Amino acid sequence: MNNAHFRIAAIAAVAMTLSICGVSRTAGAAEPGAIPSRTVNYADLNLNVPSGIQALYNRIDNAARDVCYQEVGYFFYSAQQRGLWSHCVEDAVARAIARVGNERLTALYMQNYGKKLG
């Protein structure tokens, strides 16, 4: 990806699962049915060095966690909610990393999650 920023959005499938399971959104969502997202900037990072790759990975992971908290809620009242949140984070991170298209970033994802993108 040529742009030095992108948006991370919680996946629609998780939102659909949440509504099917009766899990409510947290207060403050912009509009009903909207998928929350965050812009991740990385123009200031050098992706040719490990510290730059790690910094971008951390930004992506933090943005995904925040977006998914907005979808699932900040407090987990059940193992099911925790599972939905974990799935949301993993999927959001994978999608964002795939959009960046950097081999080193992809390798870090594979190291952390133990699987390939896709």
Image (cartoon, rainbow, N blue to C red):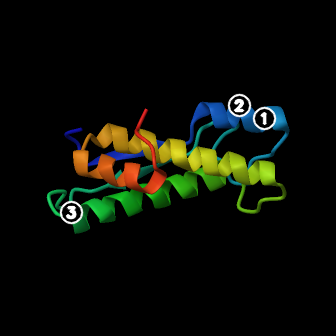
Q: Name the residue located 26 percent from the left edge and 40 percent from the top edge.
A: 101
On the image, the x and y values in percent for residue 74 come to: 71, 61
> Split into 4 quadrants, where in the image is the N terminus?
top left
Q: Amino acid at mark 2?
A: Met
Q: Secondary structure at mark 1?
A: helix
Name the residue type under label 1.
Answer: Ser
The Cα–Cα distance between marks 2 and 1, rounded to whole angstroms, is 5 Å
Residue at 59% over, 39% down: 35
Residue 66 % position (x, y): 56, 58
Q: Secondary structure at mark 3?
A: loop
Say which residue label 3 marks. 44
Residue 22 picture quarter: top right
Look at label 3 and name its amino acid.
Asp
**Residue farthest to the front, as pictured:** 114
Asked if residue 11 can be seen in this view, the reply is yes
Classify residue 29 as left or right of residue 61: right
Q: Where residue 50 sits in the image (x, y, percent)?
A: 22, 64
- Residues 97 and 73: in front is 97
Q: Say few, some or many: other residues with alpha carbon within 10 Å of mark 1 (under 14 / 14 to 19 / 20 or more).
A: few
Q: Please rate how many residues cluster around mark 2, counting C-alpha atoms within 10 Å: few if below 14, some from 14 to 19, many from 20.
A: few
> Does residue 41 appear to the left or right of 37 in the view shown?
left
In the picture, measured across the screen, residue 75 lies left or right of residue 52, that is right
Sequence-wise, the earlier of marks 1 and 3 is 1
- Left or right of 116, for residue 19: right
Residue corresponding to mark 1: 19
Residue 72 seen from this side: no
Marks 2/1 in contact by CB < 8 Å: the verdict is yes
Locate residue 57, reporting x and y percent. Answer: 36, 58
Task: Give the Cα distance between marks 3 and 2.
Answer: 36 Å
Q: Quick check: 6 above or below 43?
A: above
Q: Which mark is residue 16?
A: 2
Q: Earlier in the sequence, mark 3 or mark 2?
A: 2
